[in-house]
Image (cartoon, rainbow, N blue to C red):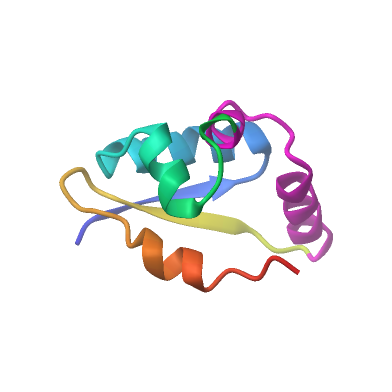
């Protein structure tokens, strides 16, 4: 499956990439929010590049460690496995 690799260096870029991935998956913000058990507003804030505290801390941590964060985006017509990625998250 073809992928698009995107380097994530700030919340605005992350928002652009997340929106593209969501749209390529054929999901609305509401549908994605329902799958992730969050609000449509939160999805909208992430996609608009709002400086959500958890995202900012993640990017600061990556930068401090001298690492680079990338996201692979599936090409149009493929779907993201949101259930698998959501079940592996650690909220603590």
Residue, x 80% and y 59% (percent of image)? 61
- Please determine whether, in this image, residue 45 is positioned above or below residue 52: above
Q: Which residues are magenta?
A: 42-65
Q: Quadrant of residue 19?
A: top left
Q: Position of residue 23 (x, y in %)?
A: 31, 35
Q: Is residue 21 left or right of residue 8?
A: left
Q: Is residue 21 above or below residue 45?
A: below
Quarter occupied by residue 84: bottom left
The residue under the point 59% across, 47% down is: 8
Quick one: quadrant of the N terminus?
bottom left
Q: Residue 24, relative to residue 45: is it above or below?
A: below
Q: Nearer the viewer, residue 86 or 8?
A: 86
**Relative to the observer, which residue lies in front, 66 or 48?**
48
Image location of residue 78, percent across then percent down: 19, 52
Query: Residue at left 80%, top 52%?
Result: 57
- Image quadrant holding the C terminus, namely bottom right
């Amino acid at each position: 499956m073809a992928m698009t690799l995107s380097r994530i260096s700030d919340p605005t870029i992350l928002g652009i990439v997340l929106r593209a991935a969501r749209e390529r998956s054929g999901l609305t913000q509401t549908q994605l929010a329902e799958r992730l058990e969050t609000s449509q507003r939160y999805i909208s804030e992430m996609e608009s590049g709002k400086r959500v505290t958890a995202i900012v801390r993640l990017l600061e941590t990556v930068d401090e460690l001298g690492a680079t964060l990338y996201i692979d985006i599936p090409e149009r017509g493929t779907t993201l496995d949101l259930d698998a990625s959501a079940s592996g998250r650690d909220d603590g």
